[in-house]
Amino acid sequence: MNREKYIYLLLLPGVLYFIIYRYVPMAGLVIAFKDFNPFTGFWNSDWVGIKHFTRMFESSEVIQVLVNTIQISLLQIFVAFPVSIILALMLNELRHATLKRFIQSLIYLPHFLSWVVVVGIFVVFLRGEGLVNSVLANFGLEAIPFLTDPAYFKPIIILQVIWKEAGWGTIIFLAALAGVNPSLYEAAVIDGANRWRQLWHVTLPAIRGVIIILFILRLGSVLDTGFEQIFLMLNPFNMDSGNVLDTYVYFKGIQQGNIGFATAVGMFKGVIGLVLVLSANRLAKRFGEDGLY
């Protein structure tokens, strides 16, 4: 450590960040086991044990919220996550450097927009008198209540995630693809492999480790569906279909002042994420991959 002290010094800001903003706040998890009163504080509030957790698993409302959260999370993992891989593979096939950079800049741009702007754009397009319904009316079709019909809530959420984050997610995959040895493609061509065969037998195996690591990391936040996006899209008509753990904690903890119960729900979400990461990492190692550690 003395020999590499400057390297550790560079590491210090990141370590301090996690200590201050990730580990120190864990002391607040004690609220999940107490009937928290802001006037008496963390340690002096009445201890209630697992009362909040019992209430959580007995509440049909929490079960519905958990189902909504899992559904949206699975859609993000199995629909939105592969889009970044597909985009990276398509960009990797472009040989015109200027066109490739232009397309990359174009698909990166939505990442830098806030969710307020993204949701605002979708609302303008999908509302009753918006562009989409205006086009449908020109073809003699009835307007579709995209923003109030619960059936459209989850597809719209996934579409927003894809449009905003898929391009940004290609960066790591493109970096992995840049490290593939060109001689592997040359050998594949000599063996008679076409572009699809090269993709399947050279490109995908080369980035398989990166895909698995990012997939494991994504599992860690499987119940984290994004508070801001969901909150902005919720309305009284789609509340049953769109209310997730993040927004439920806000409604219960902040609006209704039931901080102990909200903390228990948040703690449950974190434990599930931890278990999924550990399980997926062990499974990856069993199949011969590197995993996270």
Image (cartoon, rainbow, N blue to C red):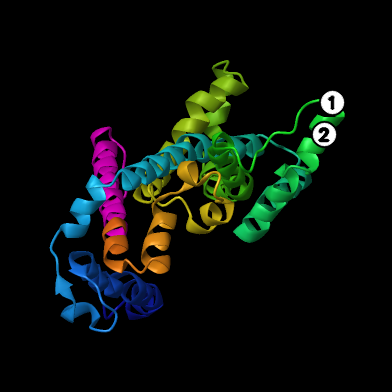
**x then y, percent, for residue 220:** 35, 50
The answer to whether 262 is drawn above or below residue 191 in the figure is: below
Residue found at the far bottom of this picture = 39
Residue located at (69% from left, 48% from top)? 122
Q: Give the number of the disc on residue 135.
A: 2
Q: Are marks 2 and 1 in contact (CB under 8 Å)?
A: yes
Residue located at (26% from left, 39% from top)? 285
Magenta region, mostly helix, strand or loop?
A: helix
**x then y, percent, for residue 211:** 44, 40
Q: Secondary structure at mark 1?
A: loop
Quadrant of the rendered image containing residue 219 = top left
The kind of residue tagged 2 is Val
**x then y, percent, for residue 52:** 21, 58
Q: Secondary structure at mark 2?
A: helix
Q: Give the number of the disc on residue 125.
A: none
The answer to whether 91 is drawn above or below residue 31 in the figure is: above
Per the model, the C-alpha gap separating discs 2 and 1 is: 7 Å
- Badge 1, how many Cα within 10 Å: few under 14, some, many 20+? few
Residue located at (64% from left, 45% from top)? 163
Of residues 2 and 30, the one nearer the viewer is 30
Give the magenta-colored segment's residue range.
Answer: 266-292
Residue found at the far top of this picture = 192
The N terminus: image quadrant: bottom left
Is residue 277 on the magenta stretch? yes
Residue found at the far right of this picture = 138
Is residue 176 on the magenta stretch? no
The kind of residue tagged 1 is Phe
Of residues 54 and 77, the one nearer the viewer is 54
Q: Is residue 134 left or right of residue 230?
A: right
The residue identified by callout 1 is 139
